[in-house]
Amino acid sequence: MERILFYILALIMIGFALASVMSRRMLRSVIYLLFVLCAVAGVYFMMDYNFLAAIQLTIYAGGIIVLIIFSVLLVHHIEMRMEIARPTRQLLTALACSLGLAAFLSVIYTYDFQVSGPGPGTEVSVIGAKLLDYGEGGFILPFEVISVLLLAAMVGAIVIAKGTKLSENKNEVK
Amino acid sequence: MPLRITENIHNWLFSVMPEGVASLVEMTLIAVVYLTIFAVAGLFLVLLERRVAAWFQLRIGPNRVGPQGLLQTMADAIKLLTKELTGTEKADKFLYNLAPYFVIISALMALAVIPFSAEFHAFDINIGIFFLIAISSIGVIGILLGGWSSNNKYALIGAMRSGVQTISYELSVGLSLLTMVVITGSLQLSEIIEVQKSGWLILQGHIPAAIAFMVFMISGTAETNRAPFDMVEAESELGAGFHTEYSGMKFAYFFLAEFINMFIISAIAATVFFGGWLSPFGITESIPELGVFWFLLKTMALVFLMMWFRWTFPRLRVDQLLTLEWKYLLPINLVNLVLMALLVWLNLTLRL
Amino acid sequence: MGSEAIIVFFLAGVVLVTGANFLSNLISPKSDSDAKRAPYESGMTTIGPTWVQFKVGYYLFAILFLVFDVEIAFLVPWAVAYKGIGAIAFVEVLIFLFILGLGLLYAWKKGALKWK
């Protein structure tokens, strides 16, 4: 049962990942990407990693996708389809992609994966205790550094979005 | 899940059928029960909204179809089912048809996590509240898609407003719930209710809890796009907002989901702040069957509060709406979280 | 019910929407005209493209949302584990929220929270 479910999810992921790259309409690509992200969340749920799955849903599916939709709508002429590349380029891209895939697969299949023992647990309370642990193996410093990182991201975004006068376009809607 | 009745059904199913079939049948039963709840609650809330609105405006409201108009919304639903499904020419058909799925599925999944009573609780996931936050952040994508793919200007503007409004207020919903998690120390909804056996959380956490409750109700109302935060579908300026181009049954999904979301927000508030299915001061503790009654009573009181908001406050402008969230609610929420942390640290919470 | 509830409720939603669509398609009347396929704009004919460019303000709020969303995701485990830990956890979250509060203050002062 689990195995079947995993293969279904994997198929969804691969299928929609391809669709996302190959779709010629921008917003549809975004939605295919959303399906991929939701399927990843599904895999986390299967592994009983509920917290990670919920984070995947809130931040990636609910946050990043909305952000991408907004940025797509910032673009002119969204209704137009993306142009198809020339055959030589297509060939080169296909070659590069299959090379990448080959490298990936060869690493995965040659590496001797060890079955990991039971971890410290995926309970939120365990994660929280680890985050607040200042002893060995604790993550108290990364937890604080994250806030600095988020601050930097916020400042950066504001500078980029506010700094240039992008918004002087007569077509824009208030 | 097993209520004594459901436990009996469960045992009976597993006794007459092989295990695989029995669990399949059981899941189907649960799904059917929840779909029924979904539909009935939606229809009932629509009627309630109309009656309450009429009451506030000194009208009578729908009272012709069935006793007290109880069958009115049923008739409306049948009417909607028989209406033609139209669409615009340039619409992105795939996304246009996809949008209702997002809205309905996210509402249904949120409903699954809500504890109606100790036993009547389909899905007691260990990240309860966070799962609710996660699921509700998916719903907005349905609205954005529906509005964009309709190829209608009203719909597009409505959807964009809805997007920016929902994501903003989602932060306040999340943070105010998190404030309460500091007391409970658990995200699982059954455990949150367990903690409240020694006093509802709004009493246990007194001042910060009351602030969190107010913030939650305000941002919950905003997240469901209800008046006074109904910029999204401001009838006087945007037609019907993001679902302008949806007709018949497809419109009904959005309409239904909106009311179910109102129910869900009230149910979360009732569960997290007012003890869920626990009776006040444990007066009916010996009769656990009354849990559903207390839960629905509390939830309906909060639903009524949200309807009251609607007929009390004028609609906000977009800029006022965002100012309220980013300059008032969010800073208040962050300070409130620290206050609550201080309270729990110094053990100043009240316990009965 | 365990995690399979997610599948059950997902399928239930799909069945609900698909089934009702199907039923509606069966019994609803069908007619077609140019006017019906045109977007509804209170009786006016649409002028110009519908899918217009939106202003950057939406994007700005989305990115601010994302930052705070990530913050909430990190605060969740903190809130759950907080009770048993006490002083350290309190000081830590104070620093965490202070730094993020600085970000909010910066956005405020820069006028990023103003809708124009």
Image (spheres, grey):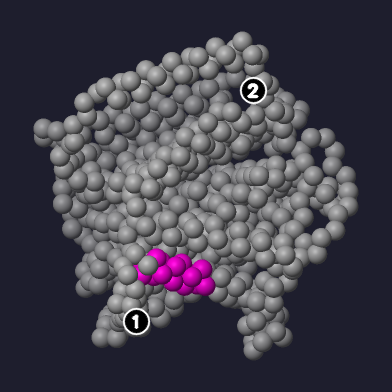
Q: Which residues are magenta?
A: B22-37
Q: Residues within 10 Å of mark 2 (few under 14, many from 20)?
A: few
Pointer 1 residue: B5
Residue C41 in percent (x, y) is at 82, 49
Q: What mark, if any, has residue A166 been given in the picture?
A: 2
Residue name at image x 43 percent, y 15 percent: A99
Residue name at image x 69 percent, y 31 percent: A78
Asked if labels 2 and 1 share a chain, the reply is no
Q: Residues within 10 Å of mark 1 (few under 14, many from 20)?
A: few
Queried whether the magenta region covers residue B31, the answer comes back as yes
Queried whether the magenta region covers residue B166, the answer comes back as no
The amino acid beneath tag 2 is: Leu
Residue name at image x 69 percent, y 54 percent: B243
The single residue placed furthest to the left in the displayed view is: A136
**Residue depth check, mark 2 versus mark 1: number of the one nearer the observer:** 1
Letter of the chain that mark 2 sits on in the rendering: A
Q: Is residue B329 above or below residue B45?
A: above
Relative to A33, is B121 on the left or the right? left
Is residue B217 visible to us here?
Answer: no
The quarter of the image holding the C terminus of chain B is bottom left
Relative to B309, is B347 on the left or the right? left
The single residue placed furthest to the bottom in the displayed view is: B67
Distance, label 2 to label 1, CA atoms, is 63 Å
Residue C71 location, quadrant: top left
Check if mark 2's residue and mark 1's residue have beta carbons within 8 Å: no
Residue C97 location, quadrant: top left
The amino acid beneath tag 1 is: Ile
